[in-house]
Amino acid sequence: MLPASVTTTDYHTGGEPFRIVPGPPVPIRGATVAERRARAIEDPDVQALRAVLCSEPRGHADMYGGFIVPPDDAGAHLGVLFWHKDGFSTACGHGTIALGVWAVDTGRVAAPETGSTDVVIDVPSGRVTARVHRQDGRVVAVDFVNVPSWVVAREVPVTTSRGEATVTMAYGGAIYATLPAAQLGLSVTPGHLGELIALGREIKWALDESEHAAHPTDPRLSGVYGTIWFDELGDAEGQVHQRNVAVFADGEVDRSPCGSGTCARLAVLADEGRLPAGTVLQHDSIVGSTFTGTVLETVDVDGRRAVLPQVTGTAYRTGEHVFSIDPHDPLVPGFVLR
């Protein structure tokens, strides 16, 4: 049963919304964040709450947010279940950045007026850190330090309505298919967005149940979360410059450069030898916002070479909301209309 009202705080990170629900008004059961996600997927009350917050008229087809839940243990400050119009995701970099700002803004995690503090967050894919930097009481940047990320497979063929393509599969807390937009005669620009969405959905669903979409140790993390299209914008000394758009879930578009997607791209670029020590990825979005990404170190994950990625951006509060839910409203929980 839906509650009569829901209170949220909304942020945007690089133009991508993130709706925070500090006290979800329905129980979300489980001993860990990963377990809570699995149970939330099967719980009609939690699904209804997600739907009412990201569907019209309270949300929209590309809405994104998170339910604050307890962390797995005392080593983290909080836990979160990430959600969108199609369900619950395993990772979200832009959301982690927004949560770092929110945790410091609200005093949930103490921070110096000038200096840095770590906000440690349990997400379904593992434990991540939002390192919040402040200057004179204002957040100026957040480093998202993600779980280890790696290349899953290269030169994976896929058939699309526009012709044959080959993609690189990579994991950054979620599994992505990545490819240059030019491979299919496109570019990462608003004018090509409709085609990028349609073809991105085709690629996702063609590979979603393939061997390349299987997480090696946790089946809850399996499946293709999205397709990342990128343009090469020219390398410089100490910098790789690309523009990208992630088409995730079932045709949703990330307005930011995509946090977990940037981690996947860092894994790919490192595997290609394009990120020697000191090199930074300038990762632009389709709306012109930018994240920067670096590889902190190379690590071993079950015998495979992986990188520990860091993505830097920031988030801004856009509003405080108390949404009313009238039990007599025939359009509850809402609808999605593109």
Image: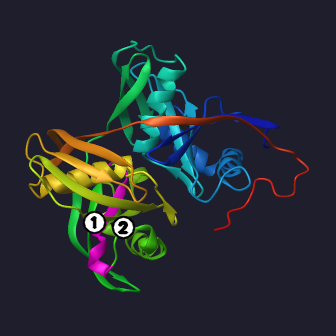
In the image, the segment drawn in magenta is 172-185
| Left or right: residue 143 compared with residue 113 | left
| Left or right: residue 42 compared with residue 243 | right
| Left or right: residue 23 compared with residue 325 | left
| Left or right: residue 148 compared with residue 236 | right
Provide residue 124's location: percent of width, then percent of height. 44, 41
> Which residue is painted at 38% across and 55% down in the image?
285
Please name the colour scheme applied to the rendered image.
rainbow
Q: Is residue 128 above or below residue 90?
A: above
Q: Residue 174 colored magenta?
A: yes
Q: Quadrant of the N terminus?
A: top right
Q: Is residue 121 above or below residue 311?
A: above
Task: Quickly name the residue at label 2.
Answer: 188
Residue 71 seen from this side: no
> Which residue is painted at 31% across and 80% down in the image?
184
Task: Quickly name the residue at label 1.
Answer: 231
Task: Depth check: give the residue in front, 210 or 260.
Answer: 260
Identify the amino acid type marked 1. Answer: Asp
Local packing at callout 2 (Cα closer than 10 Å; few below 14, some 14-19, many 20+) is: many
Q: Are marks 2 and 1 in contact (CB under 8 Å)?
A: yes
Q: Residue 31 colored magenta?
A: no
Q: Is residue 194 above or below residue 63?
A: below
> Which residue is painted at 37% across and 71% down in the image?
207
Q: Quadrant of the C terminus?
A: bottom right
Q: CA distance from mark 2 to mark 1?
A: 6 Å
Q: Residue furthest right?
A: 328
Which circle's residue, 2 or 1, is located before the other in the chain?
A: 2
Provide residue 190's location: percent of width, then percent of height. 45, 68
Identify the amino acid type marked 2. Answer: Val
